[in-house]
Image (cartoon, grey):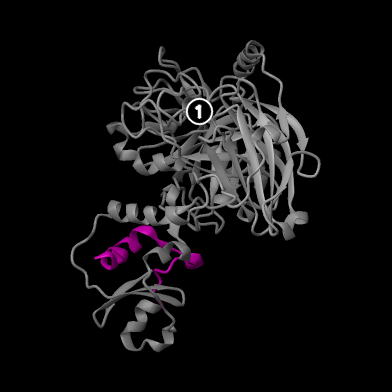
Amino acid sequence: MLVAPIRGYFFLRVDEVRILASMPPRHKISLFFLIGVVFFCAIVDAAVGRRPKRPSTPGRRLKPIEAVDHVVTERLDLEAVRQADERRERRGGPYRFAIPRKVLINPWTDGTWEDIDDESRLWRLHVTCPGAVSINLGFGRYYMPAGGSMYIYTAEGDDMLGPFTEDDNKKHGELWTPVIHSDDIVVEVTIPASQTEQLELELTSVNHGYRGFRRLFKGDKGLGDFGSCNVNVACPEGDEWRDQIRSVAVYSFGGSYQCTGVLVNNTAEDDTPYFLTARHCFYSNPSQLATSMVIYWNYEASTCEGTYAPEGYTQSGAVFRAAYTQSDFTFVQLDDEPSMVFDVYYAGWDRSDTAPASAVGIHHPNGDMKKISFEDDPLSINQYPEGDFPPDTHLRVADWDLGTTEKGSSGSPIFNSNKHITGLLHGGYAACDNNEPDWYGRFYSSWTGGGTPSTRLSDWLDPNNISGTLLDGKNPGMDMDDLEFFVPHWLEVDCNDVVGDETDWCFGTDLTRDHRVDLEDFAEVAARWLK
């Protein structure tokens, strides 16, 4: 993108479209203020991450919830669950927060239909998991016709997910939901009567949460008693790492497990939503489990001493791209680019064959709020201590100088002093009450992996085969839809109508690929328009 003053106006060129802002420049507006305005506007139109009110049905009295078809799952034996968790975690398995209950439910065999009016129909299903602290659902088949929507809300009406619409239709045909904090929920579908036969909805997994996946409210205990030495990312220690903090997220998969992962940049810098995590997180085939991933962005306390976090933003679904056991990585492509309102960052990386002189880890211990840890001493190239691993595929953190890692931190990135990813957490013995080491699978080893596109990173993160061993991170570009928040009107004037030297800006090389512009570049122009 290139900006130039023309006859007292400022033009922003994006492909064949230009924005006219008739105010001359004065002084720069704060980028953070500008971004805040962008996010405020984006929230108005963001379909993901909203907490809408329950859809109303004017003029029609619905059946009471007691009259809706009711599914009740078996109560958990929490002591047996605890023992199973201890055995699995000793073997290095992922952190579990819910028990899946396999079901086979669809609107044609279960639930309750009602006619709202001559043009709309409504289907509801009442689901109870006795004693659950949360419920999340897995739909093995999801196809919502145009005009249809689905909400999931607590029977008490104090929490809601949705709407899920045709925008959530994916090639893989699945939909997995975030958690909702209740043991008693309602699934509600509203659909045009003419589209009823087109609806495809098959609920295959009701997941009984026995440890809260997130803290949504004050006093609501989270997934689990993270160590007291952990440092909230909002603390001053995180100030130099604000961008990298935005790249890290906690995620669930299979409706029952969670780990940490990171959004990564690639050499095309085209905002492809590549997400990197640990191979050992996926207890079975990651190519099958990727579709069930639910990413939780911005789950972090707003203050250094904060003990709870407000609801963040979520997105569902991914496609498997690569994995390699020896360096313990799994690499997926998220179904959708994270919305601009999520305020994410595409982290940079370093694939050089060197050990960092110091390191910073950003992670979600026990699936809880985001934390940051510091190692001030040099790392070493090492062998993972358990299992049959090559001698040079891991980085060893001798002991953390500030903070630690815990179960649930698996898959989290470690950054060198240049703020580049150099590894992903595989495992270790670190805790608040000891000075034990951790091991991270090396980015260097994962780059070439097992020598094929499905076992290495190079094909995906360097699609243009650009030489070099490192890549800086970046903020996401802005789609045309994002730009509309700042556009008083569009000028339908072809570049050929601009004559003389003024054509330079129209055909400027600063226009990014795929009609996207850099957020920081756009900020300066949008600031002038806001004046």
The answer to whether residue 133 is seen in the rendering is: yes
The answer to whether residue 393 is seen in the rendering is: no
Reply yes or no: does residue 255 show up in magenta: no
In the visual, does 171 lie left or right of 425?
right
Residue toward you, 324 or 151: 151
Residue 96: give x, y in percent of width and height.
60, 24
Residues rendered magenta in the picture: 507-531
Q: Which residue extends farthest left? A: 26
Residue toward you, 288 or 411: 288
Reply yes or no: does residue 512 show up in magenta: yes
Q: Report the label total.
A: 1
- Three-letter amino acid code at the position of disc 1: Gly
Name the image quarter holding the N terminus.
Answer: bottom left
| Mark 1 residue element | helix
In the visual, does 445 lie left or right of 117?
left
Q: Is residue 493 above or below residue 127?
A: below
Q: Main secondary structure of the magenta part?
A: helix
Q: Is residue 71 above or below residue 148?
A: above
Residue drawn at 63 percent across, 49 percent down: 60
Residue 409: give x, y in percent of width and height.
50, 28
Residue drawn at 41 percent across, 71 percent down: 509
Q: Quadrant of residue 301?
A: top left
Residue 290: give x, y in percent of width and height.
65, 41
Q: Which residue extends farthest right? A: 109
Residue toward you, 102 or 90: 102
Residue drawn at 38 percent across, 58 percent down: 519
Q: Is residue 397 above or below residue 330?
A: above
Residue marked by disc 1: 367
